[in-house]
Structures are given as C-alpha cells and as structure tokens.
Amino acid sequence: MYAFDIERPTTIGDALSALGHEEAQALGGGQTLIPTLKQRLAAPAKLVSLTGISEMKGVCTADDGSLCIGGGTCHADVAAEAGAYPALASLAGHIGDPAVRNRGTIGGSLANNDPSACYPSAVLGSGATVITSNREIAADDFFDGLFTTALEEGEIITEVRFPVPEKASYQKFEQPASRFALVGVFVAKYADGVRVAVTGASEGGVFRWAEAEAALSANFAPEAIEGLSVDGSDMISDLHGSGAYRAHLVAVMTRRAVAAAG
Amino acid sequence: MPKDGGIGASTKRREDVRFLTGTGNYTDDINLRGQAYVHFLRSDVAHGKINKVDTEAASGMPGVLRIFTGADFEGVGSIPCGWQVTDRFGEVMQEPAHPVLAQGKVRHVGDPIAAIVAETYMQARDAAEAIEYDIDELPAVVNMKDALKEGAPKVHDDLKNNLCYDWGFVEENKAAVNEAFEKAAHVTTLELVNNRLIANPMEPRVAVGDFNRSTGDSTLYTTSQNPHVIRLLMGAFVLGIPEHKLRVVSPDVGGGFGTKIFHYAEEAFCTFAAKALNRPVKWTSTRSEAFMSDAHGRDHVTKIELALDKDNNFTALRTDTHANMGAYLSTFAPSVPTWLHGTLMAGNYKTPLIYVNVKAVFTNTVPVDAYRGAGRPEATYQLERVIDKAARELGVDPIALRRQNFITEFPYATPVAVEYDTGDYNATMDKLEEIADFKGFAARRKASEAKGMLRGLGINCYIEACGIAPSNLVGQLGARAGLYESATVRVNATGGLVVMTGSHSHGQGHETAFPQVIAEMIGIDADMVEIVHGDTGNAPMGMGTYGSRSLAVGGSAMVRATEKIINKAKKIAAHLMEASEADIELKDGAFSVAGTDKSVAWGDVTLAAYVPHNYPLEDIEPGLEETAFYDPSNFTYPSGAYACEVEVDPDTGRVTIERFSAADDFGNIVNPMIVSGQVHGGIGQGIGQALLEACAYDENGQLQTGSYMDYAMPRADDVPFYTVDHSCQTPCTHNPLGVKGCGEAGAIGSPPAVVNAVIDALQSGGKNVTHIDMPLSPSRVWDAMQG
Amino acid sequence: MPQVNMTVNGKSASGQIEGRTLLVEFLRETLGLTGTHVGCDTSQCGACVVHVDGRAVKACTMFAAEAEGAEVLTIESMAAPDGTLNTIQQAFQDHHGLQCGFCTPGMVMSAAALLAENPKPTEAEVRNYLEGNICRCTGYHNIVKAILAASGQDVSAIAAE
C-alpha cells in the first residue's frame, strides 16, 4: 500500500468535509478497497472511513412500507435485520464469507459496482432508490458500467430504499475461486410487473433482462422464459466460463429464481 | 506397552497445544534485533532482455539500505539442480544457470530483477517503484509443444533449444512394446493434461538471514521441509559457505506439500545480504508473490495407449509425455517426470511391456517441481483413466478388468525397474467395495435422478513408491545427493530422551508419532521422549521430509539409533546386576536378568551412564547417546483403491462430491489418527486438482491465476466427510517398522476416481463424453455436455 | 504518526501506527501477538480472523486505525490463563482438526463466532460458515468434525479416527 492518512469521522457532515480534500477517498467496509490498495492499484492521499458514522447504519421500514438500509450497514446486519425482504436478507447473507459480511457494507458495494457483486442486482432488480449525501438516484440511473456509477466525487451513499416486492429470489452461481457471482439473477415480482436483474455475466456490469421481465410479468412461472436467452457475445468470457456458458446460466438462474420465489 | 501411547495408538498430538493457543513459532514470527526487510522487484513480463536497471533514485528513498541487482551476484554460484537426468541417447540433460537475481534476461513473470533492502518492508516496497528499469520484451514460449518447434524463442540463449531432455524408459523395451501394440486385440488411447497446480501451503515462504560478525557464522531461518538440504545446496553451491559456518533453521512450518523442499533464490539472497549489510535481512512472501515464485507442480501433457489381448489382459502400455520444467530447473524438477513417474507406470497391474517417453521442456513460466505425490499422481491418473476408458470401450466392468490384471504375487519385478515387496490389491478392492457401499449405488443413483441430477461412481487403484530412497540406486539415476536419513538419540541422566531427527514435521505430527515408537521399544511413557527437528545445529544430517519418507526412512534411523542405545544400556544393566549381557531383557522400562527376579529400572541405568561410579568403564564409555544413519534398501509401495460418487447438475455442469471412500494399505501403522488425517488431506487436494485448481498462463506468459480470486482452492463446502480405512496391511519387508508411508496417497489416488465418476455420471445421462481435462469446473463439464 | 488505542484480549493496548497499518500488523508487530497469521493478500484465506467487538473479522482487511476503541480478541485469549484449552480448542486436538497449525487460529476464531450465533449447527452450516477459512492440510474432515463435537453433538458416527 502507498502511504495515506486515515480519518474516521462520526457524522456524515464531517465525512463530507473530509472527503472535500484532494485525493481523499471514502472507505466503507474495505473488503474490496483494502485488497486493491495492497496491490497498489489505488493511491489515495487520505482515506475517510465511514465505519464510525452511526447514522448511516441500520435497517428500518419507511411509512410507505419500503425497506431502508443505511449505507454503512454491513452485510451481516442486513442478513439479520432485513426480514421484511427475505430475498434481500438471503442475498446479503451469502455475500463473501462471514468475516467479510461483518465488515463489508451495502454502500461500499454499490459505490464500487463490481460487475460480479451481488448487491447491484438487488438494487436494480428491486427498482430501489440510492440516497446519497446530496440527492436520490433511481436504480436505473445509478449503475453505469464496470466499476462506474452515477456517484460524483465526494458523494457518499447514506441509504438505500427498497420497495418490498410480493415475491422475490436471488440465485447465485458462484465463480469457483473468488466465489463472487459468475452469474447472479435477482427476480422480484411487484404489483406493476416483474424486474429481472443480472450480475456477474455482462461485460457492461449489472443489467436488466427486459425480455424475461416482459414474459414473467405476463406469467410468473419458470416456463414463461422457455426459449428466451441473452446474447452470449455480450457476456464476459474468461477462465471460469465462456460468454455462451454465462448466457446459458442467466436463463437457468432466472428460472430457478422464479421457482424459488414461488 | 499400554495402547494409549505406543505403536498403534491414536495418541493426541502434543504439538497441537501450541498451535491452538497461537504460540507456535513460525519463521515469520522470528524477528531479530536490527532486522532489515527485503522486497523483490519482480519481472512483469515473461521473457525479456534487461537493458538497464537504474537504482540510483531508489537508493535515496527513505529507509533504503542497499539495492542489489544481478550484477551483485556475479561470481556467486547458480541455484543448483539436485538431479541430472540422462536422456535416451545417453546424453545428459541441458542444464541452464539460475542466478539469484536475473542477469541479462528475465525468463518468467516473477523473476526477481532487483532486491531492495530497507529499514521497513513498506519502505522497501515504496523504493521498488523508484527503480528505473528498461526491459525489451521478447516473445515468450508458454505451450510446451510450441516451445519445441524449430525456431521457437529460446528461454536460455546458451542452450541448444528448449528441450531439457528426451527420456525413454525402458529404451530397450521400445521395439517389443511397439510390436505388442501391433498384435493387440484392442487398443485404448487417451490424450490428457495433468493440470498445473500451485501447492499453496497456507504459510507463505519466509527467509531471515543473519550473520554473526564475531564468529563469521551465517544463520538462515527458512520455511523449509529440509533445512540440511538447504544448507548443502546454498552453502556448497551458491554462496560458498562451509557447513560448519552455516546453520539453517526451519522452525514450525505451515505446510509444505513439496514446494518447500527446494532451495530458492530468496533464501540465498537473505543469507548473502545479511553478511553484506551486517544486519539480519527478512523476506516474507505475500500470497501474490508466492503464486509467481513458489515452484509449481504437475503440468504434464500425455498421450497414453493401452494394449489388451482378446481376453482383456493388458499386454503393453505406451506413453508420450511433455513435462513442463518452467524457466529454470528447480531442485528436483528433472526427477519428477522421469524416475518418480516412469517407474510407476506398471501401477497395480502385471502389464509385461511398458515404454515411457518424456520430453522435459523449458518455458517462460515459473519453475515446476515436486508437488504432493510428484510424478506418481501423473502416472496414476493416466493409467487409471485409460483403464476406465478401456473398460467402457470393451463393455466390461471396470473393477473386474482391474482385478483380472492385478499383480497377485510378491515380490514382483515390474518391467519399469522397480520391485514391489508386498501388497494385496484384491484385499484393498474388497475393502473398498464394502466401505463405499457399491451395493447401494443403484438406489442412490435413482434418488439423484429423481431430483434431476446425474450420479456417477468412479473407482481407481494406485500404487506409489515411497520411503525415498536407496542412495546407491538414486545415484545411478542421477541424484546428486544420498537419500538416507539420520537420527541422534540422546538419553539424559534422569531417563528422558531427546531425538534429533533429520526428518522435518510441517503438519505430519512427528513430535507425537516418533515418541510412540521409542515408547514401544523401551517400554516407557511417550512423554519421556522429545523430538527435535528443523535445525542443522542438532541432527547430524538430514535429507528431510517429502516422498512419504519420514517414518520409513527417518523413523528407521531413529529405530537403529535406539537399538544402539538399548544395546549399550543392556551392558550397563548387566554390570549393575552382575549378570551376563546376554541374559538381560528389557521390558516395560526395566531391565531384568532372565530367569531371576533381579531388575533395574530404565532410570537407574541412564543415571549410571552419567554418574558412572559403578560402571564398566574399562569396556564402555560413560554417557548414553547414539547416532544412526539409515539408507533404505528399496522403496516402499503403499497401495490402495479409491471410490468417488458425484452428482452432476445437467443444467449447470456443476459437480458435487457426494461420497468419497479410500481403502489403503500402508503396512504397519504407528498412529492411526494421524494416518487418517494425512489421507483426508491428500483427498482434499486431489479433489481440488480434479474439480477446482488450475494454474493458467496466457499466450504471453502472463499468469492468469495470480491469486485466490482466480485459483480455486478447495473449501470446506466443496468436500464431504470421507470414509477411509487402512486395515489392509501388508507390512514392508525391508524396514524395521514395516511401514510404507501415507503422506501422498490421498493426492495420488483421488483425482482419477473423481474424473471416472463424472464420466460415469455423464454417460448415465446419455452424454457421449469420454474425457474432460481437469479441473472439471462447471463450465468445462457443461461445455463437454454440449458435445 | 498517529496513535491508536484499543483493548486486546482484555488489556488496553496502544501504539504508533501509519494510516496504512493493518490491524493484523498492529497485533503481530506492535503487540507481538503472532498467533494471528497472514496467509493471503486478497482477504480469502482467513488465517487472520480475530474478533472485533464480538464479531469475526479478517484482521488483514481492516486498518488498525479502524479498531480505535474496539475490543479485540485473538487466538491468544482463547485458552484459560492456566493454559487449559477451551471447548473448541480441545475438540480440535481431540479430533485431529489441525496439522501444520497455520490456518488453525483463524479456524478456531471462526468456529467460536459460529457457535456463538448458532450453538448447534448442522454439518452443512459448519461447512458453509468456513467458506472464508482455507485449510490445505486436513481436507476439512476433522475440522468440521471437531466443530460439531465442540457444539456438543455426537460425532461418533462420522467415519474415521
């Protein structure tokens, strides 16, 4: 790691002013950023740890019934406390491993937007709202390709608000080494339609599978997507699987998610 | 001897207490006064000409003590290779130089270009980035067959080509083998890859060099399986330090699996730099560095052919293998695809004619050397896969085909130069059929199919040659060392014993198992025996721990030394009891005179040895300490039969290991608990090789699996509980304990069972798949299913 | 250099650190608590697992500065002051749940966290919980068996010694 200073503010306001310094970078749970720093792939002059900000932690239900998760809430806490949205709690409970889940945060995961991370699929698949230090961003406007989001410099995710669906399920097929999603599919059925978000698979990061959404909105059953497929040439092709394989898994995992959602 | 402490007892391990309480002493836990830290700047290209390494700016960075480059090691020896193979034309192998730091060229990603020594590790790493170097990238050779093509880029410009050797075994049999193939009723052919692996002991390598200016002595603390071997190789061949001025210490070592046998450049560097700087110098590998600097394993590409007569008897076997050496010859690299592989090609079968050809090839990759099993897994895998394929082609039961061809009479001289002393392959197969519950398989398959899963059962046999090895034999085969072991047994005045052994424990439990042997021999409590290892300052010499040799060779040396102790103690006891030495019996820790009630305790005799007031001083010296060297007269030949049951998800290609059973014959067993643990661990690694692990390079020689993000290590949820049995015992006939060795069996015996099971599952589902190369990852299995 | 203060194994501990000093470096180098190991640099092997404020974390993936004011427990805290092994440690010894010992501190700390939240886990739950702890020696058989035994469950039916 390159040398840097580290600050640990206790309020969002202090965090924002600390992030105002040049080359300052926010540090969530650090489960991705710290390994990146070890490889010397990033060189912040200052890290602003968000782990001391209690107002950014916790899970609650809003008046409209949506589930609100503080940006600094770790995966283990979401798994334990998001019982109102079981598919989301289950997703959180299967990210990484137990020790990673005790540190890694939803805000950190979303801000990083790793193409193989789980959370982006839940946010996009739920049509959630990402609330930052200065605005609200709809899920459909938030993700912007690999490791890129709508977040601006110094902007931090303070909360994510999930409308709770009638039914939902996340099905992850793990890459055997990293155990990130080789393909992960989040399916959520709302009164006004079904959303299907896919992570791990695409060169462009998390995406919605519109054809499957249309078919499942008409008939929420695994066989509804029979014959539908995503284009393998748009999918990631690497040591762990070809684009064609990933495309195949997208359909398999979607069917399984629908079946599991019931 | 009460059975809670002697031979055959599952004594709990005494070393566990320190490991469980965080008080072990691993090399990275050692910090010496005034210690500096080294970071190696490593090549990020696979092949290149070094034009310039400018360290001037970096030398001025905070904390930097000195920066070394290849130029600092001119006149210093090359990292040596310990085995010289002679090819099938009678020529010795091509053997390139291996400088401590790269000179002129870099030859693999990770080849060290410069070494920065600084007050702290972070300062050394910071300074590395200020080194200005200019390397012209050259085309890399990665694929072995491409490397042998005319005009291929040469890894070593001063060699003729990239062929280390072209070995034929047994060359004289070649014509007869070819003739047998022409006459065969059936020939089964299989082309396969034995995947390149990275050993990945959980403790990364560490070296701490120290120099004592007042005595001129050097000390190296290092994560080694064989500190005496490191002392010999580094002292005599690289740095020119005589043994009496060099001590090598390997304290608690966190796993080895072969990759900590070898002498590495970082060890020589730390020892050299400590003297140059007159300060201790420490290097701790990161895991990322380990991936590009620890010797890798396996990496064979093989075509195997099996000839059978009309009655399905094996009549001949022919193999053609390319074995990757990487960019330099690691310590034992040349021996692995040859003498540790070709000699095992008979397996458990009475195939009369065998010919093995191996071309060892230099490539721009990390050196490849022994990894758990070393040559024997490669032999077993190809043989047991081709037999399974033959059974399918012939429509016969794979177990029956094996049984029909089993060797049943011992000793048995194979056509590949080794003589099996004992074994009973039908017994282990019978045991396997029982513990693996073959009878219940059909019902289990039905249950799997009801869930939409394909279920397969795969079996295989294995034999290995352990207890490495008779020195006179390996000397003829090209070893540049003897492969005996030594032990010194020191008995203290009050009766306790210290055994200084050249064997090294890095997980094997010697500290517990070795005392069980002595406790049995003398009839005392095992707690009275302490095992000291891992320090050239103690045991007189040591060839170390690998090749499942510790108990068979090191244990035998300890037995021989203890026999000498007992013989001397009997003389003392005879004197004390005024009896004839011939009448003295040792039982339950006491010496008695046969036919009388006279007796003296063990402690009385040991005290007399050190307080010799009443002592036969005219006949024997005071004191009670003996040393023995044991050189085995043959290898040992553990064998067994393994079964694996898998489920394959036809939608995703994902393979799940449902059951795994192992029936082994290890001869006599000292501590069954430890033996089972060794088998479990080997199976875990074998399943890893079969389903998960692969070290991959791209065509430019970039390592694609440079961390656990891409190199899939087996995790707890990748494996089931295993059923292991070692009740079939045909004791080794030529070592005093009748033991054979158990450390590598699991890793040797398990990959073919897994692959055979997956093929069985896929064929049961109507898929015409006859082979998939390891690892059988979901994507590879799915690809194969697509036809 | 800034100062960090925390409680480690019940004792207050402080030291000078850099921003980039990892918790594991502080434990091993500043405090000399070398029972916590480093087996990788990508947060996967789990040899460095410790408890911070009652939760299992990877000490290689947390800065020492982030542990300011925290209660940290390491492997060195697990046995009784007289050296008596705790239930988990004893089960690891009884069932041969370790070989080289390098991953063992992390395994024990993870097992302790598991049993704290799930006192009678199933075999599958144990295996799943150990996803972030890699062992290269044991094939996991005896680790899983030891943890089940430490939870008070009968493991006599599980094959092998």
Image: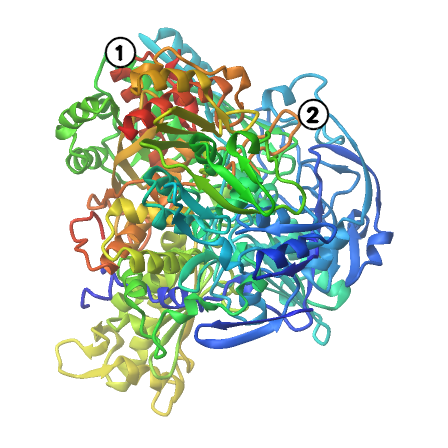
Q: Quadrant of the C terminus of chain B?
A: top left
Q: Which residue is mark 2?
A: B161
Question: Looking at the image, is B316 positioned above or below residue B98?
Answer: above
Residue A114 lies in quadrant:
top right
Q: Residue furthest front?
A: A63
Nearer to the camera, A50 or B589: A50
Estimate the x, y position of residue A157 in percent, counting from the top left: 55, 46
Horizontal side of B723 relative to B209 (left or right) equals: left
Estimate the x, y position of residue B559 in percent, counting from the top left: 34, 62
Spatial CA distance of label 2 from label 1 is 42 Å
Q: Residue at x 62, y 32 (%)?
A: B93
Task: Residue B465: tell me if it is visible.
Answer: no
Q: Residue at x 34, y 62 (%)?
A: B514
Name which residue type carries label 1.
Answer: Leu
Estimate the x, y position of residue C7 in percent, counting from the top left: 49, 73
Estimate the x, y position of residue B763 in percent, counting from the top left: 28, 16
Q: Chain of mark 2?
A: B
Q: Which residue is mark 1?
A: B394
